[in-house]
Amino acid sequence: MSLSTRTIYKILKRHGLNILKCNAKINYKRFAMKHPNDMVQMDILGPVYLSNSDVRNYIISCLDDCSRKVASRWSERKRSVDVLNVLEDWIINNGKPKTVMHDNGKQFTSNIFKHFLVHNHIKDKRIPNSYPQLQGKIEAYNKIVKNEFLALEDILDIEDGKLRYDMFVKAYNEAREHGGINGLTPSEMFLQKLITSAIDKGTKQQSVTPVGNQKCNLSV
């Protein structure tokens, strides 16, 4: 008797035998940097489309590995300069990170991006191909954006989207409690870890003091 693989699959499915059960338990160790700005993760979500438009939009984000605090922008482009604008937002408001982790997207491997990191003494850390789990925290943030912003907000146009998204980022940082950081908000976790770090070192961490809207002297 000769049976096709499709027929065999249909018979197995009919009897509920088409899925193999695995009892193996995989234990994942949660890892996070000890101090704020030890490392930030960067990523681009998109393209994002509005219901009444076929124009591509993107969400560019920079997330602190220690606290989950994020700097993020709604962008109509995803060039290296757009990515650097978000990284500069982070630096101006939260201080300069020691390391930037990212995938191998061309925006992050371009000469202008690498030049910025080198001249500002920031370590460049690329994740290996096929290992997106190494950026699990920013991937989790992207999922939050999809489920709690894009899926719920009735966005009228691009300008409306930018305004609403800025409000969402502020609420995420300052109001949304995060289960992965003991129920704190990312801003609370950032400040708490910053204070702990200063006490441990016995010195005040001037490098990460917010500077508001002051200009940031960064080399590009």
Image: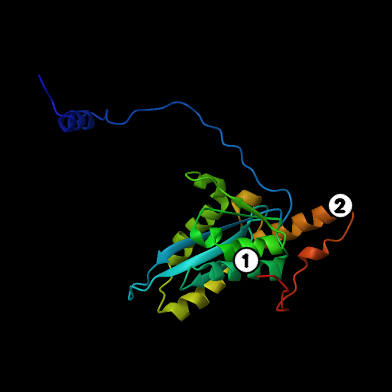
How packed mark 2 is, by other alpha carbons closer than 10 Å (few <14, some 14-19, many 20 or more), is: few
Disc 2 designates what residue? 201
Residue located at (54% from left, 62% from top): 110
Residue located at (53% from left, 57% from top): 141
Residue located at (40% from left, 73% from top): 154
Mark closer to the chain start, 1 or 2: 1
Please state which of residues 40 and 118 is positioned toward the viewer in this rendering: 118
Q: Is residue 13 visible?
A: yes
User: Given the current orientation, which residue lies at the most extreme top position?
Assistant: 1
- Mark 1: which amino acid? Leu
- Mark 2: which amino acid? Lys
Q: Image quadrant of residue 80?
A: bottom right
Disc 1 designates what residue? 87
Please state which of residues 158 and 217 is positioned toward the viewer in this rendering: 217
Please state which of residues 131 and 50 is positioned toward the viewer in this rendering: 131
Please state which of residues 98 and 110 is positioned toward the viewer in this rendering: 110
Q: Is residue 101 left or right of residue 56?
A: right
